[in-house]
Image (tube, coloured by chain):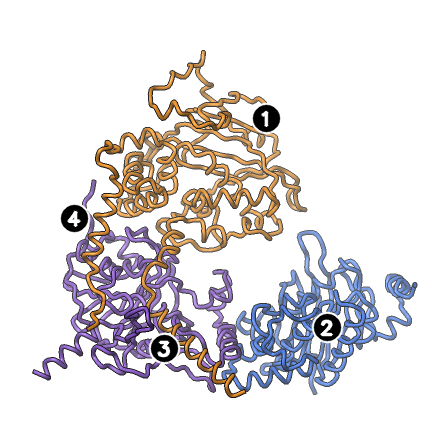
Amino acid sequence: MTGPLLTVAGLTRLYGARVGCRDVSFELWPGEVMGIVGESGSGKTTLLNCLSARLEPSTGHVVYDTRDDGPIDIYAMSEPRRRLLMRTDWGIVHQNPRDGLRMGVSAGANVGERLMAVGARHYGEIRAQADEWLRKVEIEPERIDDLPLTFSGGMLQRLQIARNLVTHPRLVFMDEPTGGLDVSVQARLLDLLRRLVTDLGLAAIVVTHDLAVARLLAHRLMVMRRGEVVETGLTDQVLDDPHHPYTQLLVSSVLQP
Amino acid sequence: MYVAVKGGETAIDNAHRLMAEARRGDPAVPELTVEQIANQLGLAVDRVMTEGSVYDRELAALAIKQAQGDLIEAVFLLRAYRTTLPRFGGSEPIDTGDMAIRRRISAAFKDLPGGQVLGPTYDYTHRLLDFALAAGGDPPPAALAERPVDAHMPRVADVLSQEGLIERDRPGEDEGPPCDLTRQPLEFPAGRDLRLQALARGDEGFLLSLAYSSQRGYGNTHPFAGEIRMGEVAIEFLPEELGFPIEIGTITVTECQMINQFKGTKDIPPQFTRGYGLAFGHAERKAMAMALVDRSLRAGELGEDVANPVQDEEFVLAHADNVEASGFVQHLKLPHYVDFQSELELIRRLRAAAIRREAAE
Amino acid sequence: MTTASGYNFAYLDEQTKRMIRRAILKAVAIPGYQVPFGSREMPLPYGWGTGGIQVTAAVIGPDDRLKVIDQGADDTTNAVSIRRFFARTAGVATTERTTAATVIQTRHRIPETPLTEGQILVYQVPIPEPLRWLEPRETETRRMHALADYGAMHVKLYEDIARYGRIATTYDYPVLVNDRYLMRPSPIPKFDNPKMDMSPALQLFGAGREKRIYAVPPYTKVRSLDFKDHPFAVQSWDRPCELCGATDSFLDEVVTDDRGGRMFVCSDTDHCGTRRDAAQEAAE
């Protein structure tokens, strides 16, 4: 019987006297998608950064169930180990794909980099995998040697996703994955993300201010306000029957024309 | 039959002789003396002393003569000489508050204790070529003031700090003696001691352009020239066996204190911040540029966005040294036959492969 | 004014030499690791071998015999200038024979004649950091070395193959030293890379402007990066040296006229000369 993939306990991050996020606790199970919603400034991104080993919390723990050694606090790991984890078993999808890609090297190299980082040394095999992943994210394989500079916004985001998934991670962090994209492009990307998450059995934590994105992707939701979680529950439950006044406000403001 | 190129030794000797001849120029024209350079090309000497990190007017003048007036080459000569000098120790910090002032201006206050002392400056001259100067002759003597300048002139920054309006200069008490850039490699992040040394030795033109870029919006620091002062300061040295410092001489320095607006953060109330510049001799452009760049490089420390070249410590400090830059740019003149041969061979193979592919299609 | 005779043996003062020797010892102890050192201003320009000269000055003694090459040749101007510098400031014996030298300072080549135990090869290094092309920041590259985070280096090789069908790095070809540190061998042609592997000689690398020293101790593994299906390979020529007939040496191309006339000769002048002398002796 396996336990939760990620266990978060009493996570607090302060910026001086200001609260980034306070006393967040939850469990994420394998294959589960958790949405974090709230207005900008509510602490979503701070929380995501703390969870994904990019911002050390002031207090609290983030424990990840590693493949080899079971649950370990990610901030107690050695840095090499944490880096290895981040580029093998985890994926991080940035809102701006340029933050997550090497814009100066080809699409194929972008996808292949993680494989090379963990020791892949067969060019043909690396390329074959890059080819396969480009197809999976609906980028024509002919573009494999093109620089990302020549890609559209939607393609860049899909390339970033391929780059993350090539090592078959079990957990992916996404920060506003559809932010900055046209509505039609958003729909296609969401569709793709949902399919990939289901097919691959990925667990994911998705930060978004867009409740439509949350409804489509997330199994469970956490609603944040001023750095604190004000409501959690199954996505449909939270969106259709919000209990906290803030959630009610959030939901009603979306429903207004 | 082909014989590989030989004769490097003779060629180098001959090149040196030719250069010496070119340097001397027309033998019918009297040769420049080092004294003439030290006296009449004083600002060039000041720059070479500053960037060469040696306060010695004669050596700097000799370097300028030897370099045919190429100041970067002269800096290089002086630095190479400096390396060979024994090191007795470090002086006590100089006290620019106690400077024998020759020039002192503030753009921040109309008047202040000690007053504005214009001193020698080109600032307000019309830049008209002076043909009378070409003819030679002694200038009329400068007028003497009715009374000497005040013996004590407080530094503008000290005046402001009495009110707590400007950040305090943090004395490096607990930091131990300052690092020495000429003995230790520059490591990042660099402390302010290393940064100021690197800037003081840095190329005036490079710092000037960086400072300028900050004024034009690439990382504005909202500066005021709080004070620029130039004059003589005493150098004191503390021999361990004596136990008290003794004065070993005086040097001329130019100091610039930039005062910069700072909106404050949650931890620090709004106040003015400082940028600091110091150069040997009379070198206002250098001291001002240095002060602006120093302040810009504090962006990270002050919680400002680091988004422009002038705020990027590694970019600025790694490229400010003109002796390093000049050497590396010019090393491209050295033979690269072997590397070029390797590239030549690769290009031929790639082209051949491309042509074969085309033919096959 | 001080004259040349007023300088210490081999120009640098003894304290500076000790400082450099400490850096060298550390570099030898951690093969391939770049040790920062207090590089001095030298009377030669940066980029012209100041790092190599400081290393040579720190290791050379009165009984040494020094050989200096640039592009494999003893008589190129920069080699002449550096050899002369040491002849003048250290009064050491110099030689053009690889086999007779105890210390060899080089720019851009490793001699063709295999080096032996007890010899020291000093490389002049312009840019010591192999990761510089993809990460300009020292703070970040230091971290990458500390964590042996070298995957990105293969990205460059991947790009080469994707674009050109082969690895298009021909000189300064990155190597992994002792299975741990990624190292730049200085701009030697990749032809010379295999000579570094398990060499009986001590290999020291000096970068003056960048203020770094690194080393490959004798009998240390030096592996050139590659892919399994695109293995590392060195350049070869489909003709021998036109002077000595060598088929296994690195050849320089010499333009003999302006109508496309070319001839190919050994870049290593000592190797070429020795072979020609031997051939002549055999003929007599």
Q: Amino acid at mark 4?
A: Ser
Q: Amino acid at mark 1?
A: Phe
Q: CA distance from mark 1 to mark 3?
A: 65 Å
Q: Please, is residue A117 above or below residue C78 in the view?
A: below
Q: CA distance from mark 4 to mark 2?
A: 73 Å
Q: Which mark is residue B40?
A: none
Q: Which mark is residue A205?
A: 2
Q: Amino acid at mark 2?
A: Ile
**What shade does chain B have?**
orange
Can residue C30 be seen at all in this image of the molecule? no
**What shade does chain A have?**
blue
Q: CA distance from mark 3 to mark 4?
A: 41 Å
For mark 3, what is the residue?
C222
Q: How many marks?
A: 4
Q: Secondary structure at mark 4?
A: helix
For mark 4, what is the residue?
C5
Q: Which mark is residue B109?
A: 1
Q: Is residue B360 left or right of residue B221?
A: left
Q: Is residue A254 left or right of residue B164?
A: right
Q: Is residue A207 left or right of residue B353?
A: right
Report x, y in % for residue A186.
Answer: 78, 71
Contact check, label 4 and label 2, Cβ < 8 Å: no
Instruction: Residue at 16% x, 63% y: name it.
Output: C94
* Pointers 1 and 3 within a single chain: no
Answer with mark 3 or mark 4, whichever residue precedes in sequence.
Answer: 4
Q: Secondary structure at mark 3?
A: strand
Q: Secondary structure at mark 1?
A: loop
The crowding category of the residue bearing disc 1, from other C-alpha atoms within 10 Å (few below 14, some 14 to 19, many at least 20), is few
- Which of the 4 image quadrants contains residue A191? bottom right
**What shade does chain C have?**
purple
